[in-house]
Image: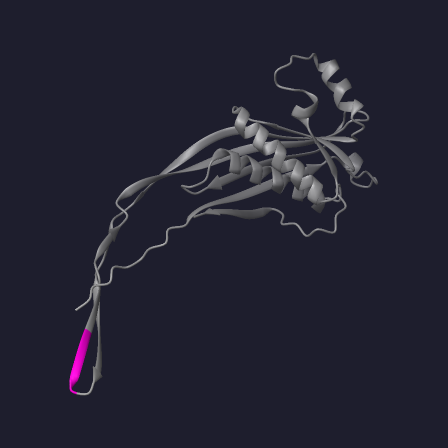
Amino acid sequence: MKFLAPLFLIILSACVTTKTTGYLDPAYRDSSYTVNKVVVKATSDSMEESMLAETELVNKFSSLGVEAIKYTDIIPPTRNYETAEVMKLVKKTGADSMFIASTNGKSTIESYVPPTYHAGSSTSYISGFGNYATVNTYHQPSYTTGGYSISTPTMTTSSYLFDLKNGNTIWQAEGSAGGNAFSNYSELLISSGKDAISDLVEKGLIVSETPVQTSVQTSEVKSQ
């Protein structure tokens, strides 16, 4: 008689769902304005979240054919500049636009997963040769899942696109993002920012041949 224990492969998956509502200023609705070179700024209460988001959002713009520059490469967080000096350095890059994605609020949702009992099972296989017979029995033991609480992060965001030539607000948006127990706030800010960029494409401010998801998008990151 043989006993075979079940083999479980656990995959941790961080899944984020975002939603964005964007508004394009009337003065730019019928204009030929498009974003060709942009300075990207991400703001959060965590430096790590801000810098990770800036890097990922720059990559998103680049994938759409837009030249993008990280704000922190122009204005290092270790230096203090007056607003006028900041704008001077930003405009010196030759960018036509500035994109800002910022965190408004963070919260967590607590959920209880009730315990569920899963009964075990046994399967037998009979094999024979001549006058001999062998019975192999495989057992899968019973187990219980659940019986614990999980915390899932949520976030609200704001995004803006500015015309660096005159300082006008071209577009602004409000967003929300929610994850599962394996998500973190950096992933929420990044996903919400990418969704906002997709809205810029939808509204014609970015001309790209790359297909994008708009309104509601889900991103998944897996680690084994």
Classify residue 38 by image quadrant.
top right
Q: Is residue 181 above or below residue 212?
A: above
Looking at the picture, how far across and down is residue 160, in whole percent? 67, 31
Assign the magenta stretch its main secondary structure: strand
The magenta region covers 131-135
Classify residue 195 by image quadrant.
top right
Residue visible at 49% across and 34% down?
185
Please tell me which residue lies in front, 171 or 8: 8
Please tell me which residue lies in front, 35 or 71: 71
Classify residue 164 by image quadrant.
top right
Furthest residue toward bottom: 130
Q: Is residue 133 above or below residue 34?
A: below
Q: Could you tell me which quadrant the N terminus lies in?
A: bottom left
**Colour scheme shown:** one colour
Q: How many marks?
A: 0
Looking at the picture, how far across and down is residue 18, in whole percent? 54, 43
Looking at the picture, how far across and down is residue 179, in whole percent? 46, 41
Q: Is residue 52 above or below residue 195?
A: above
Residue visible at 74% across and 35% down?
25
Please tell me which residue lies in front, 131 or 155: 131
Residue visible at 21% across and 62% down?
120
Residue visible at 57% across and 28% down?
50
Q: Is residue 66 left or right of residue 22?
A: right
Please tell me which residue lies in front, 119 or 199: 119
Q: Is residue 191 left or right of residue 202?
A: left
Residue 70 sits inside the magenta stretch: no
Looking at the picture, how far across and down is residue 178, in whole percent? 48, 40
